[in-house]
Amino acid sequence: MEEECRVLSIQSHVVRGYVGNRAATFPLQVLGFEVDAVNSVQFSNHTGYSHWKGQVLNSDELHELYDGLKLNNVSKYDYVLTGYTRDKSFLAMVVDIVRELKQQSPRLVYVCDPVMGDKWNGEGSMYVPEDLLPVYREKVVPVADIITPNQFEAELLSGRKIHSQEEALAVMDVLHAMGPDTVVITSSDLPSPRGSNYLIALGSQRTRAPDGSVVTQRIRMEMCKVDAVFVGTGDLFAAMLLAWTHKHPNNLKVACEKTVSAMHHVLQRTIKCAKARAGEGLKPSPAQLELRMVQSKKDIENPEIVVQATVL
């Protein structure tokens, strides 16, 4: 019997749609993982809609939930996955929990999507309070094993700008030095040789050879852009990268190809359905652009590889 692999996922939750834990839990379960979800926020829907209502969990409430797991002796995990958080004390409490879980299980892998902001029309801006940045830099990244920042977040964490592939690789080295062995810059505005219709993602993984030496594999992926604003794609990416790096622990190329190819299939299905629902020539609404996750089950389980990674 295959040993169960258990993930503690601490992310946002929405009643309607697929972001945060809603975007991460289903693909992880489909790929064979048991998921225990803690909601950092609980909203009616994601913030891409005109209105939303809900609650934000504080650090005391997080601690109380974790205490309940410990009291029942069910706090042993193989992975911790974190995403969107708005409160610095909550984020600091997450770090305390990760440290404690790593003491119990030294092989635990912490996958962190450092959700802080993004670039629009070339200008970056944060959509979480700025006091979260030093917590990510000084406490979170040093205990993380895998991080999945976008270009803007990688620049914030490293304190360096990225204008070229060489600078991106240097930034990933800075991030490696802070702690994580695997760094994936999930999207960038770097120019693609294939034209402006393509988005570049970059990955870097350090592995230790039996003789103790460190080997670094670097990859580049070029993904076809989709003309729509999706919410939850970063959460889905981090969850699937967790799953595929588990199945291919020393092959970032294959893990990223499967992750990005599955993303491609989900997004293509989503935009096709959204346009059909919106009607000819009309822009799809946020509700119509919710990720078609359940309909993409087979693509998540066994993605046809449509995006090849280049080893640098």
Image (cartoon, rainbow, N blue to C red):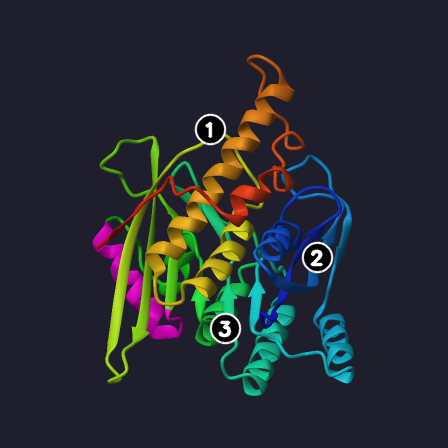
Q: Of the numbered discs in the image, which one, if any, rests on residue 109? A: 3
Q: Of the residues under marks 3 and 2, which one precedes in the sequence? A: 2
Q: Secondary structure at mark 3?
A: strand
Left or right of residue 223, residue 192 in this image: left
Question: Residue 146: horizontal and vertical position, in percent?
Answer: 44, 66
> What residue would you read off at disc 1?
227
At mark 2, the secondary structure is: strand
CA neighbours of label 3 inside 10 A, class few (<14), some (14 to 19), many (20+): many
Question: Would you place residue 221 above or below residue 107 in this image?
Answer: above
Tag 1 or tag 2, which sits nearer the N-term?
2
Instruction: Tell me if residue 243 comes above or below residue 290 in the rendering.
Output: below
**Does residue 274 appear left or right of residue 250 in this picture?**
right
Q: Determine which residue is flagged by label 2.
A: 41
Residue 151 visible, this orientation: no
Residue type at numbered disc 1: Asp
Q: Residue at x 64, y 71 (%)?
A: 89
Q: Which one is nearer the viewer's eye here, 138 or 250?
A: 250
- Mark 1: give few (<14), some (14-19) or many (20+) Cα within 10 Å: few
Q: How many angstroms separate mark 3 from mark 1 (CA)?
A: 34 Å
**Quadrant of the rendered image containing residue 158:** bottom left
Which one is nearer the viewer's eye here, 44 or 301? Answer: 301
User: Disc number at residue 165?
Assistant: none
The kind of residue on which mark 3 rests is Val
Q: Magenta span covers which residues?
A: 165-181
Which is in the foreground here, disc 3 or disc 2?
A: 3
Image: 224 above or below 24 = above
Could you tell me what secondary structure mostly forms the magenta stretch? helix
Mark 2 Cα shell of 10 Å, populated few (<14), some (14-19), many (≥20)? many
Q: Residue at x 70, y 72 (%)?
A: 59
On the image, the x and y values in percent for residue 137 come to: 45, 70
